Amino acid sequence: MQNFNRRDFLKFSGAASLLTLPALVNCSKNEDSPINTHNISDPWLEINLNNIAWNLSEIRQLVSPRPVMAVIKANAYGHGLVEVARFLEKQKVEFLAVGNIAEAVKVKESGVKTPVLNFGPFSSQDAEQLVRLNISQSVYTDGIERLSEAARKLNKTAKVHIKVDTGLGRVGVPYYKALLFIKKVADLPGISIEGIFTTFTEDEEFDKIQLQRFLKTCQASKEYGINVGLRHAVSSAGLLSFPAAFLDMVRPGITIYGHYPSDKEYLARKINLKPAMSLKAKVMYVKNLRPGDAVSYHRKFVAKKETRVATLPVGYSDGYPYQVAEKGEAIIQGKRWKIIAAVTANHTTLNVTGVNKIKIGDEAVLFGKQNSTEVTAENIANWVGTSVYKIVIGMNSLLKRFYIGK
């Protein structure tokens, strides 16, 4: 069973979203096909676009006819910002959402036409770029005036989504002050209110209170003759547990990539998700240990008997968690093998005793499927006591990513 909570991710995603974009290799075909790894020596990621399409279809069936704002912050949860944005546009997603200005600009400059909302902050210098590139911006402070000035200067309209804090307490105009702020935004020249949103605490009972606060704010705005646009509140967790809060649009994140936000949603499985990401590497060395021979720093693993080991060129510098040593498993030749010694910056060692056919160049799967055998990102999260968010987002941006499918 998984053992994680998405709240861990909330502390983690900000830094991850600043990572540079990954190396991209487009291997798209009409059907899933094996990757030609003949000339690859470094570890790599495979991103199954068919599975992303499947997950999006499952989400749409759950929320139809509402539009979907697909969250692609934190480098599309490690899956590759631009490639995923382009693919989701082909899938006719209505909106995209990112975590910072850099991501928003990168997506727009890649040629994506789908509307993009930036959840993150912006400076006076950013304001003109936001307006010029037609990027929607979340607002909840007097910084909104910068957008108004930029819009007037460029003779364009700045689109905004007003963030209302109904109890999560991070950012957003407090719900009891929201109407005054909304009236101010509505009166500013050059500003168009495209939407209004909030974020739930994921405390089942308190979320209901939050929803009522949010709906009252929206209703009060309507009574003042203000059109607040699309109301949106649920992310992946609410998508699977709080249908009353679907409102005008939903904001799925981790579910698009095939993962459930917590144990609760995993066990309920209201929709059938398929993980899109796999981490793979090739066996770089195989050797036999004699009794007393050791592996890794500080002689972390000492063989008590004849032991055969295989070393993989993947480690914590790639985002593979070092805590998985002595707990986790990886797949070679369709079988799961125990990880021994320590996971170092660039190496992971497996105990493959009993099989002499494993050789240098064999494909190893750190998470993903090989034939009918699977190790999931959730398995890894459980082994190391973290969230699946951290596993997929934590994959090094320099890892080569191969895109399989549509």
Image (cartoon, helix red, strand yellow):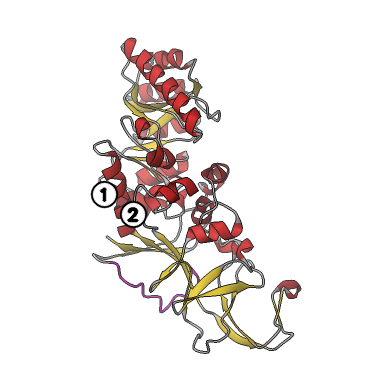
Q: In the rendered picture of this protein, how many numbered marks are placed on residues?
A: 2
Magenta residues (range) = 32-43
Q: Which residue is label 2 attached to?
A: 52
Whether the magenta-drawn stretch holds residue 99 is answered as no
Q: Amino acid at mark 1?
A: Gln
Residue 91 - label? 1
Q: Residues within 10 Å of mark 2 (few under 14, many from 20)?
A: many
Seen from the viewer's position, the closer of residues 39 and 173 is 173
Q: Are marks 1 and 2 in contact (CB under 8 Å)?
A: yes
Q: Position of residue 62 (x, y in %)?
A: 29, 42
- Front-lying residue, 67 or 302: 302
**5 versus 30 height, above or below:** above
Which tag is nearer the camera, tag 1 or tag 2? Answer: 2
The x, y position of residue 242, in whole percent, is 39, 35
Give the distance between the C-alpha atoms of the residues marked 1 and 2, in whole angstroms.
Answer: 10 Å
Q: Which mark is residue 305?
A: none
Q: Which SS does the magenta portion mostly show?
A: loop
Q: Mark 1 vs mark 2: which is more N-terminal?
A: 2
